[in-house]
Structure formats: structure tokens, C-alpha cells
Image (spheres, rainbow, N blue to C red):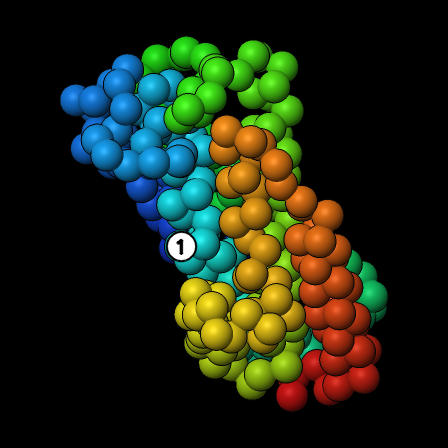
Amino acid sequence: MLRVELTTQLLRLRTLITFACLAAVPAMAALATASNAGHRNGDQGGLFGTSTCSALNHTMASLQFIAPLLLPLVVAMLACAIASADRDWGTLRYLYVAPVTRSRLLAGKLGAVAITSLTATGCVLAGGLLSGLAWFGWHPFRIIDAPTLTSGETAGRVLAASGYTLLCMLSIAAIAFTLGLLLPRGAEALGAAVAFVVLASILNGQSSLHTVAVLLPVHYWQNWTHLFTPTATTHLGTGILAQIATITLATGIAVLVLKRRDPAA
């Protein structure tokens, strides 16, 4: 089932174009700022200010730019498609006749969701790294008002940031997947998932609604950026727990839906 899901979803023209667009955004950003190669990127601060200093600086700046909205929307689209495609195409009942148990079907779909989320995140990182190498070269990681990082420090922080972002994308993927099973059509599930990401991002930006925002997984998505500040103090533990709790809750609901509901409903 995993092979079927991956073949069906990953090799679709729509999916390939989407992945290409994710990789193209960092490449276009590198082209636009190539004139500042080796120097600070204008008056900007943080990761954006040092994005033109090295390939890895550009990669992390690209991740910070894409991860809050564009990347989760792509992940949500893929997760909704995996959850609802068989029902939309009218082939879900035939899978059970094959026979394919509900547990096997769910395991295959969840595995496909995880792999597509990993692929989408990897496209952003690969696009940032390759375009960064082409325009800015391989140099030590720069942080404004702080010493350059050693190779070991850079590797550890980049891996932590990438892994944390992937976990965050898995949380929105789990939500979108569950919506794909709950709602009658995949388009409706995608619309609901997009609305959730956008509204949660708006709520997260309102300081007066902080008590509400901290209950949403979106609130913790950018915590990894503190790894690349002069103090390098960050607390990813709360964010990790929030994402795991979201994934567990959403997956549990998905299991109940697929176990108890008519497969074509």
C-alpha cells in the first residue's frame, strides 16, 4: 500500500511541479541578492541579514521564509490528497474487496504522508543549499554580532532546525490527513486545512491573543530560529511536545474515522 500511495501521489505532475516550485523559491531569492554575496544583506537582521554570506546561511534563511506558510500549505495539500483521493475517485470500496484491511490502508497512507512531508521539506533545503553554493559559496556560518560558528556547531544547529521543522510539518500533515478522512471531498479538506494555517498564523501574530495562540501548534513553528541568534538560547522542548501531541491526537481521530465509518461516506 505504501508503494501504491507513493507512486500515485509523488509521481503526479501536480506534485512534481509543486516540489519544483518549493526548490525554486530559494533559487530566485539567491539570484535576487547575488550582488551582496559575501556581505551583509542590506539592513536586514537575523538569518535574512546573513543569507548572502554562505550557502548554509542562505539555506536557513530560505527555510525561515518558506516554513511559516508556503511549506505547510504544500504539505497540507499532499496530505489531503493522500487521505481523500481513493474516496474521490470511487475506488476505496474496491480496495477492501481486494482485500486490503483498514489497518493496512491506514498504515500505507500515513507512511506516504510522512515521506511526502519529508520530501517537501527536503526540496526547500536542497534548493537553498544548491543555489547558495552557486551564488555565495561554502563559507563558515555567520551570525550578526556573534563569532562565526565552527563546523560542528553549524552541523548540529542546522540538523536540529531541519528536524524540528520536519516535525512541525508532520503536525499540519496529520491535521490535513484527518480532515481528508472526515470531510466529504478532498477540496473541502484542503480548504479547511488552508484556513486553519492562515487563521492560526494570524492569531499567532496578535499579542492580545497570546493565551489562545499557545494552544496551537503553529505558535511554535519558528522556535528553531533562536538557534541562530547571538545568545543561541532556545527552548524547543515545548514546541516538540506540542507537535507530538497534535500528531497523536490527529492520528488517533483518523484511526477512529477509518475504523468505524463507511469507507465511501
The answer to whether residue 207 is seen in the rendering is yes
The vertical placement of 123 against 35, above or below, is below
Q: Which of the pair 30/127 is nearer the observer?
A: 30
Indicate the quadrant where residue 113 lies: bottom right
Q: Position of residue 60 (x, y in %)?
A: 45, 33
Instruction: State the residue at coordinates (44%, 70%).
Output: 206
Question: In the structure shown, which secondary structural element does the residue marked by tag 1 occupy?
Answer: helix
The residue that label 1 is drawn on is 70
Q: Which of the pair 127/113 is nearer the observer?
A: 127
Q: Is residue 87 left or right of residue 103?
A: left
The quadrant of the picture occupied by the C terminus is bottom right
Instruction: State the residue at coordinates (75%, 86%).
Output: 261
Q: Which of the pair 37/3 is nearer the observer?
A: 37
Indicate the quadrant where residue 154 lies: top right
Instruction: State the residue at coordinates (61%, 36%).
Output: 233
Q: Position of residue 132 (x, y in %)?
A: 35, 23
The vertical placement of 262 against 241, above or below, is below
Report the amino acid beneath label 1: Leu
Q: Is residue 196 left or right of residue 27?
A: right
